[in-house]
Image (cartoon, rainbow, N blue to C red):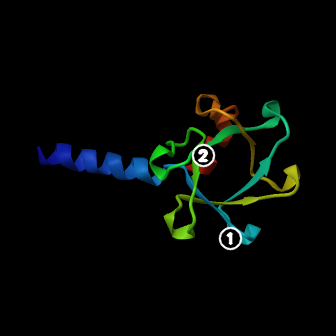
Amino acid sequence: MIKCIAVLSFSVLTANLSAQKVFSTRYSSQAEVKVFVTEYESQADLKVYKVTYDSQAGNNNGKWFFTQYESQAAKKIYFTDYESQADLKIFFVKYDSQAGWRNKDKQHLMY
């Protein structure tokens, strides 16, 4: 019974650590991941849907909640001006069902 509780607690903590709560930094040196927003969906590694509430944030599935404070975020990102400066290319989608990875080779960046 104690092992089950420990495993369940670890699973919940792990899920929270990889939740897509992001903070947009002012400077690239403050970020863990540099992101470029593409003009077309086909150019992106990840299709992102901006959720309204932090409880809607996904588990590395492209549903991002932008936090007001850095300490609330699981990942700190910086939006670059040029594609060549970015670690990850994203495209913002209109519907949550459209969110997800197009290039799973980059998925590790958001864990």
Residue at x-position 75% and y-position 67%:
28
Q: Which amino acid does label 1 sit on?
A: Gln
Front residue of 56 and 23:
56
Image position, residue 70 (x, y; %) = 57, 68
Q: In this view, does 40 lie to the left or right of 69?
A: right
Q: Is residue 1 left or right of residue 75?
A: left
Q: Do the residues labelled 1 and 2 touch (CB within 8 Å)?
A: no
Q: In which quarter of the image is residue 96?
A: top right
Residue on which disc 1 sits: 30
Image position, residue 88 (x, y; %) = 73, 48
Image position, residue 23 (x, y; %) = 61, 61
SS label for mark 1: helix
Give the mark nearest the N terminus, 1 or 2.
1
Count of labels in the image: 2
In the picture, the quarter occupied by the N terminus is top left
Q: In which quarter of the image is residue 45?
A: top right
SS label for mark 2: helix
Q: Is residue 29 left or right of residue 61?
A: right
Mark 1 and mark 2: Cα distance apart in space: 19 Å
Q: Which amino acid does label 2 sit on?
A: His
Front residue of 22 and 107:
22
Residue at x-position 27% and y-position 50%:
9
How dense is the environment of label 2, judged by Cα within 10 Å: few (below 14), some, or many (20 and up)? few
Image position, residue 17 (x, y; %) = 45, 54
Residue at x-position 63% and y-position 32%:
95
Up/down of 35 relative to 59, above or below? below
Residue on which disc 2 sits: 108
What's the mark number on residue 80? none
Q: Of all residues shown, which one is farthest toward the front?
A: 52
Q: Nearer the viewer, mark 1 or mark 2?
A: 1
Q: Of all residues shown, which one is farthest toward the left?
A: 1
